Amino acid sequence: MKSKKITATNSLQKATKRWGFLFMGPVLIAFIIGFVWPFIQGIWLSMCQFRLISDAKFIGFGNYVKTFQDASFRHAFWYTAMFAIVSLVIINVLAFIVAYILTLEIKGSNLYRTVFFMPNLIGGIVLGYIWSMIFDGILGRYQTSILLESKYGFWGLIILMCWQQIGYMMIIYVAGLQNVPGDILEAARIDGATSMQTLFKVTIPNVMSSFTICMFLTLTNGFKLFDQNLALTGGQPFIIQPGGTTVKTTEMLALNIYNTFYSSNTTSQGVAQAKAVVFFILVAGLGLLQLSYTRKREVQQ
Amino acid sequence: MKKKIVSTMLCAAMITTMLAGCGGSDNGGAAQTPAADDSAAEAPAGDDSAAAPAAGGGSVYWLNFKPESDEVLQEVAADYTAKTGVEVKVVTAASGTYSTTLLSEMDKSAPPTLFVIGNQAGVKDWKDYALDLNGTAIANELNTDAYNLYDETGKLVSIGYCYECYGIIVNPDLIEKAGHTMDEIKNFDGLKAVAEDIHARAGELGFDAFSSSDMDDSSSWRFTGHMANLEYYYEQEGTNWTECPPTISGKYLDNFKNLYDLCINNSLTDPKELATGGHDAENEFKTGQAAFFVNGSWEYEAVKADVPNATMIPYYCGVAGEEKAGLNCGTENCWAINSKASAEDQQATMDFMVWCVTDPDASRKLVDTFGVMPYKSAAESTNGFLAAADKYTSDGCYVMNWATNFQPNVDSYRATLVSALNQYNADQSDANWETVRTAFVDGWAAEYNAVNN
């Protein structure tokens, strides 16, 4: 009986090795069509001048030069960076607090978890428009609007993102908190640790892997934010400089790329593509940096 | 070791998934057109590489520009297929996304055979993709050359299939209810007197002068696109622009301000509440809450049931001699045939177009949604606003052409103007109006430079 089982497992492993590619295939093909190929094409197009991508003309690194000369891109970068950091901190702190409270065996905590998670299921564009009405319903009383002050736009977007993402991050933290071994907590209690000590010396180190994931998600989400930005303020208000050029004060990187791409300048598509490549390197770099940093703080059980 | 490789791959896969958004959205159709791309790489300058697959006998793919007409167009397309067996696909770009949709659709393996090139900027961008329509069957059906677009070599790039007019829609019944007559409104002073009187007595009358002039995307074009036209029109000083001027002077901006101020300050809605919109101006007009509504001839279908006497008056703004002003007539609805489509598809498209403007039933349906079609055999217009435009013209008034179509980098220019107007609406100070002036005048030059350098 036992030996049979072993041979069955062995032949299963062999079969898996032999036929694995068959099962990998579709995913691999989809991955190549959906990600790898467009990505390579994107890099190629960033060095071209084009209107239709089937009709591109190679021009070298001119697009990158224009990208770095573009003041609006630099403004969008700093604005986005600030947004990403602020939202990362606020979302993670609040999500952890909520998760911590909801794992304290409060009555109806399952209901709370569901309710907190729900905003995450709504699309970004819809949220943006709904929140713009909510904010203006309030700001209207003070004779102003979210479109009139950059700081309202900034904090409005933070509130929106918190509302949407805290529930999602909370679920990840809840899962992490539930996995903290009871015996360690018990040992801490027996050793006379206060609840604060337990939290900071036992619980948090044990959920560091959740922090890694959540911080990665919030950081990259913050950088890539597009729908909500477009729908909530669309870059308004603009600072209209003498000479007629504008700075779109609440325009983030992704929206900046989008606006560049669809402007009617014949060279702008290539510039937008170059911006997108720079954007990718930036987000990937920051994401990996953050990953390696928090990874070091994880503990193995 | 293996575990490490697997986890690295997983990591890479995850990161790519997360970041797919940044590259992916920019080249939506990329994955589907590897073939077209290869051929372009071999012959980078070649324009003739992306041909649509020839369907037996040809088919029509119309990329429609007017969301409000979508339903009728689908119906007409189905009729044509039922009659002739030729497949007609109509795809409608969502409001305000026509140019982005066109850009991505043209890159697909079966691009639109019939699309819209609506203005000189469009001609510049798309002339290489448009068939020369000079002397073609459809061109011979036209009854006027006024709405056609040519490129600099005289190629007929696109031809008007309908035209429109805009101005101020008025409910004459409400004007009379307020104790005035339409005859009092012959210039800006007349309009101002009537509007201010109605606004002052709004509580007692139960209706106000102007409907809301929201500044959100669904409404702001009525001001940044249409009303702005009065400035450009008068600035042309009688010689119509044929291409986008690098700069404008803003000489008549004060006239724009006259009418704009009248609009926002004698309205149902406090100007401070216009920024994010949420008011339904059309509904306010239809339900008799407002006597004036800044919009165009396409609104006739929507308001005629509730306001059967609705008519349209010109943008009176205090320019000398404006008693002789007419409505703003023009079009951005011009058909172009894709020159890269197969000969069969081009022929099928041409046949379909001719059928649209000659078949009594089809042209009836189309004229009812478009307003009017400038073709010899097309059905008569039943649009009251276009009739008003006609009346002004036959009374010897000047037609205000759509100089607004020359706005450079139009989306960006208008967005800047909206931002400036938002500040002004919230606080109607001189300083804020100067910002509007900067956006309006200097913004034109800045956008022109951005596009042409």
Image: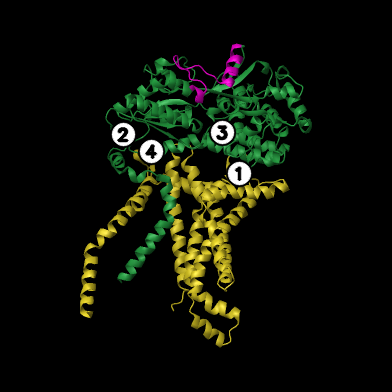
Chain colours: A yellow, B green
Answer yes or no: is residue B189 visible: no
Q: Is residue B383 magenta?
A: yes
Label 1 vs label 2, nearer the camera? 2
Residue range (magenta): B367-394
Q: Chain of mark 1?
A: A
Query: Which three-letter amino acid code belongs to the residue tagged 3?
Result: Ala
Q: Are marks 1 and 4 on the same chain?
A: yes
Marks 4/2: CA distance?
Answer: 15 Å
Q: Which residue is mark 4?
A: A52
Quadrant containing the C terminus of chain A is bottom left
Query: Which three-letter amino acid code belongs to the residue tagged 1?
Result: Phe
C-beta proximity under 8 Å, tags 2 and 3: no
Marks 4/3: CA distance?
Answer: 27 Å
**Identity of the residue furthest to the bottom in this view:** A191
Q: Which residue is mark 2?
A: B52
Q: Chain of mark 2?
A: B
Disc with the residue nearer the chain's start (1 vs 4)? 4
Badge 4 crowding class, 10 Å Cα cut-off, few under 14, some 14 to 19, many 20 or more, is some
Q: Which residue is mark 1?
A: A238
Q: Which residue is mark 3?
A: B445
Instruction: Say what secondary structure mark 1 lies in.
Output: strand
> In the rendering, at what x and y percent does residue B101 appear?
44, 38
Q: Quadrant of residue B287?
A: top right
Label 2 vs label 3, nearer the camera? 2
Say if B2 sits above or below B45 in the image.
below
Query: Which three-letter amino acid code belongs to the residue tagged 2?
Result: Ala
